[in-house]
């Protein structure tokens, strides 16, 4: 399944053949060790439910210029940074939007929104009724929050130090913080239309 939305960008489900480029782009945009081969393999496996993959890449001339990593509703558990009591649907029906990344020189072309729409389409086929994301509030110009809000996401809660554990114990090197990551994450939910 490959979809062409604009003449120079093709969208296709994530496969292992994309891993090297996805890791490179993710680490360039989000900081060293944001993605590793073993972590991406785990994320990839969590994207599947009943033979349907909810993660996508955007390709330009065969190169990955964006990706959306999504966990199927059946493949993840909420954690300390989740507030399921405030979610408008049952936790068992919520997929998780792990990461959306677009190459800086390709931003502003609608790639992130197109990737999100494709992941939502697949997540709905998997049985999800909503999707949760933790939005990086330190993104330049708060673009991540604006993007997710523009696409229908609503703020559930804010979580200081969301990525601190990853920076202390997993080698994540935040591109904004000097030592350990202190960035705040916004818990946001997007409820799917029928």
Image (tube, rainbow, N blue to C red):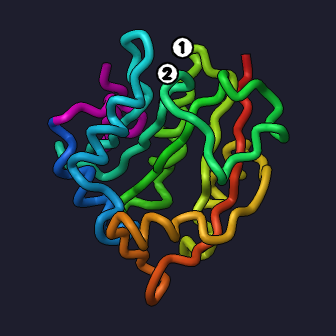
Instruction: Give how far across and how far down residue 185 sits, in percent.
Output: 64, 63
Q: At 52% from the left edge and 33% from the top edge, which residue is drawn? A: 76
Q: At 43% from the left edge and 75% from the top edge, which residue is drawn? A: 174
Quadrant of image for the N terminus = top left
The answer to whether residue 2 is magenta is yes
Q: Count residues near mark 1 (Cα–Cα under 10 Å), then give few for <14, some for 14-19, many for 20+.
A: some
Residue 122: give its label.
2
Is 34 situated above or below 100? below
The answer to whether residue 51 is magenta is no
In the picture, residue 13 is in which quadrant? top left
Count every numbered label the image shows and give the total: 2
Q: Quick one: SS at disc 1?
A: helix
Q: Quick one: SS at disc 2?
A: helix
Is 171 situated above or below 153? below
Q: At 49% from the left edge and 66% from the top edge, which residue is drawn? A: 165
In the picture, residue 152 is in which quadrant? top right
Instruction: Give how far across and how far down residue 61 sits, in percent.
Output: 18, 45
Residue 125: give its label.
1
Q: Nearer the viewer, residue 106 or 162?
A: 162
């Amino acid at each position: 399944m490959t979809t062409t939305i604009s003449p120079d960008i093709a969208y296709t489900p994530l496969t292992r053949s994309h891993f090297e480029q996805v890791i490179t782009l993710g680490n360039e945009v989000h900081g060293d060790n944001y993605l590793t081969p073993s972590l991406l393999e785990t994320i990839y496996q969590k994207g599947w439910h009943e033979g349907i993959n909810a993660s996508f890449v955007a390709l330009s001339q065969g190169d990955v210029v964006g990706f959306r990593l999504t966990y199927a509703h059946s493949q993840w558990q909420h954690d300390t940074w989740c507030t399921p009591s405030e979610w408008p649907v049952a936790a068992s029906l919520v997929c998780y939007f792990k990461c959306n990344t677009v190459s800086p020189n390709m931003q502003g072309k609608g790639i992130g929104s197109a990737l999100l729409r494709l992941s939502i389409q697949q997540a709905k086929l998997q049985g999800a009724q909503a999707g949760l994301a933790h939005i990086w509030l330190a993104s330049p110009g708060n673009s991540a929050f604006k993007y997710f809000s523009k696409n229908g996401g609503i703020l559930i809660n804010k979580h200081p130090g969301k990525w601190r554990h990853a920076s202390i114990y997993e080698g994540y090197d935040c591109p904004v913080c000097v030592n350990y990551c202190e960035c705040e994450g916004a818990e946001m939910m997007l409820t799917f239309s029928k």
